[in-house]
Image (spheres, rainbow, N blue to C red):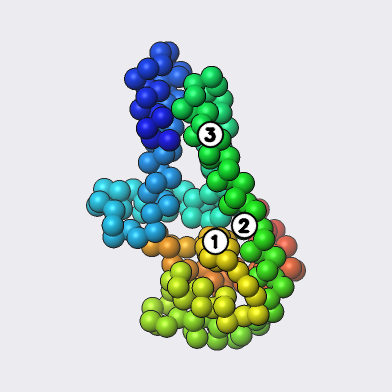
Amino acid sequence: MIAASVFGILYRSGLLRTLVQVYLGIFGVTICVVETVDTKSLARPLAQFKAFVFKYFHFMFVLYGRALFYGFCTSLLLAQWPYAPDVLVGLWMSFVTFTYAVVGFVGSGKMKESGFPESEDGLEAAFREADVDRDDRLSPTEFEGLCKSLPMHMTLQEVEAQMLMVGTDTDGFITYDAYMKYFILASQPNRQVAHLTNFSR
C-alpha cells in the first residue's frame, strides 16, 4: 500500500489524486505499525506512533474495528480505478478484510460453544492459571494455552483473532481487565444490553 501510494504520487496528476495517495501512504504505515506485534522491534518514532494510535484510535487494536478500517482502505483503493497498483492492493485488502471477519466470527462461535467459565471466579481462575509469568497479561502463547485447555479446537489464526476480539495492548498482550470485561459481557447477554445502554449515554 505504501509503495502503490508513492508511485501514485509520482505518476498521477491532480490535487485530489495526490491527496488520496498521501492518505493511502499514511494508512499503509499505520497498518504496518499496528500489525507489528513486537513493539521493541520498531524504531522509537514508530513505537511512539503505535502508542498514539492505541490511545486515540483504539479500535485498530480490536478485530472488527481493524476489519472496518481495512474495509475503508479497500474502498478507497478500489475507487482509484483504473490505476492498477491501487486496485491490486485494494483486492488484496478486500481478501484480508474478509478473512479477518470470517476467522473472528468462526472463532467466536467456537469460544461460545467451548464451555468457557461463566462466573467471575471461574474466569479469574482460568486467567491466573494461563498467566504463566504472572504479569497480569496473557501473551499469544499463554492465550493459546488457555484455549487448548478448553474442549475446543482452534487454529492459530482463530486464536489470534480471538485475542483481537478481547482487545490487546500495544505489545499484543491481553490485559486482565480486558479479559474479564470481554468474557463477562460475552457470557451474560443481559449485561451486554446494559453495557451498550450505558455506553450510548
- In the displayed structure, 73 sits above or below 19; it is below
What x and y, as percent, mark residue 18? 41, 20
Nearer-N-terminus badge (1/2) = 2
Residue ID for mark 2: 103
Q: Is residue 124 above or below residue 6?
A: below
Q: Is residue 20 visible?
A: yes
- Asked if residue 200 lies left or right of residue 42, the reply is right
Q: Position of residue 110 (x, y in %)?
A: 68, 69
Determine which residue is flagged by label 3.
90
Residue at (53% x, 34% y) in the render: 90
Q: Is residue 162 visible?
A: no
Q: Nearer the viewer, residue 44 or 132?
A: 132
* Marks 3 and 1, the one that precedes in the sequence: 3
Locate the C terminus and report the quarter of the image it occupies: bottom right
Residue at mark 3 to residue at mark 2: CA–CA distance: 20 Å
Residue 141 higher or lower than 192, as above or below: below
Task: Please tell me whether mark 1 sits on a helix, a strand or a loop.
Answer: helix
Q: Name the residue tied to disc 1.
A: 157
Instruction: Answer with the quarter of the image where residue 149 lies.
Output: bottom right
At x 40%, y 13%, the residue is 13
Q: What is the CA distance from the residue labelled 3 to the residue labelled 1?
A: 22 Å
The amino acid beneath tag 3 is: Gly
Residues at marks 3 and 2 touching, judged by CB atoms closer than 8 Å = no
- The tag earlier along the polypeptide, 3 or 2, is 3
Which residue is most to the top? Answer: 14
Question: Looking at the rendering, which quadrant does residue 105 occupy?
Answer: bottom right
Helix, strand or loop for disc 2: helix
Badge 2: residue crowd in 10 Å (few <14, some 14–19, many ≥20): some
Crowding at dot 1, Cα within 10 Å, few <14 / some 14-19 / many 20+, comes out as: some
Identify residue type, mark 2.
Val
Residue at the far left: name it: 44
C-beta proximity under 8 Å, tags 1 and 2: yes
